[in-house]
Image (tube, helix red, strand yellow):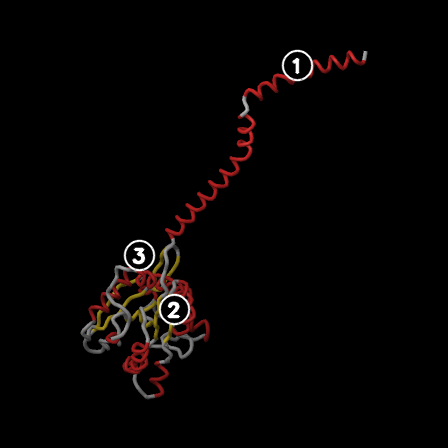
Amino acid sequence: MRNQTRIIIGLFLIIFISPIIIATLSNPQQIGIMEMADEKPDEKADEKAVVVYAATQNQNLDNIKIIEPRKALLLFTHSHESFIPIVKNETGQAEVYHSTSNITAFEDIIRNHFSLNSIETEFLGIDTMSELKKTNRTFPEAYNVVRPYLTENVQNNKYDIIIDLHRDSTTRKNSTLTYNNETFGKIYFVVGEEHPNYLINKSYAQHLSSHLNELVPGISKGVIGKKGDHVDGIYNQDLANNMVLIELGGIDNTQEEINRSISVLAKAVSELLQDESNNLVSHAGL
């Protein structure tokens, strides 16, 4: 009885298994295809991933704008010009000139914003107003006081731009811009027209003014030329073709407004210096 059972089970196994064996033997590539199906998709997926990554890498590298480091010299001919809200906050006094709370206090802010835009910044190490007082000279002589220090730096160093930074004497209505719900101290440029190459300085200032207004429309009031009686007429701009005098904000502008304007100025200067099509001047100096 047991033998009959075994025989019956064996016959059933043969009947069900034999078609599978026959099908396999009749298509010997099936096993290879199955193995390829197990292996190749992963390899292709890996290869595809690498190719896509490489393409993405190349695309990103193509879009990266390499910014060459630049060098700027800044000075404050009227070093004690101040902003009433800042002085009042620090001393309780409403003063437009102050020996410590003045435009020179923005050196670190300027340095940081310029550095973020790949511009190394140097400051001319002279407190012009204090020097005037020591030597018993008057306010209009400030440009003569700073000139020897500036001349030495220009002769011994190469700068991509030189900025003489001032604070305008105008009030808040004329010195403030509201843009995208933020307020800025307006900027404008002064060019002395009593030296032979003033048109180069003027064109340079106009280009920088345009870059400013492209970033924040209306932040620059443009370029003003000065000559004749009761003005300096040169502003030491005869020492370098790429020197600009900038009036930053007015007596009523706040710390935050001046900070914002400095940020925009740094970006505009960087764009100007990186503009390869702008060949108005080379390095500073005669």
Callout in the foreground (1, 2): 1
Horizontal and vertical percent for residue 131?
Answer: 35, 84
Residue bearing the label numbered 1: 15
**Residue placed most toward the observer, 87 or 150:** 150
Which badge, 3 or 2, is on the more N-terminal residue? 2
The kind of residue on which mark 2 rests is Glu
Q: Residue 120 carries which label?
A: 2
Mark 1 secondary-structure assignment: helix
Q: Which amino acid does label 3 sit on?
A: Glu
Q: Which of marks 1 and 2 is nearer the N terminus?
A: 1
Q: What element carries label 3?
A: helix
The N terminus lies in which quarter of the figure? top right
Residues at badges 1 and 3 in contact (C-beta under 8 Å)? no
Q: Nearer the viewer, mark 3 or mark 2?
A: 2
- The front one of 163 and 87 is 163
Q: Residue at x 36, y 87 (%)?
A: 134
Q: Name the residue under label 3.
A: 214
Callout 2: 10 Å neighbours few (<14), some, many (20+)?
Answer: some
Query: Type of residue at label 1?
Result: Ile
Q: In which quarter of the image is the C terminus?
A: bottom left
Q: Is residue 272 visible?
A: yes
- Mark 1 Cα within 10 Å, few/some/many (few <14, many 20+)? few
Q: Earlier in the sequence, mark 1 or mark 3?
A: 1
- Does residue 169 show up? no
Q: Nearer the viewer, residue 238 or 95?
A: 238
Where residue 86 appears, as percent x and y from the top left, is 42, 71
Q: How crowded is mark 3: few (under 14 residues within 10 Å), some or many (20 or more)?
A: few
Kindly indicate whether the residue at mark 2 contacts the one at mark 1 (C-beta within 8 angstroms): no
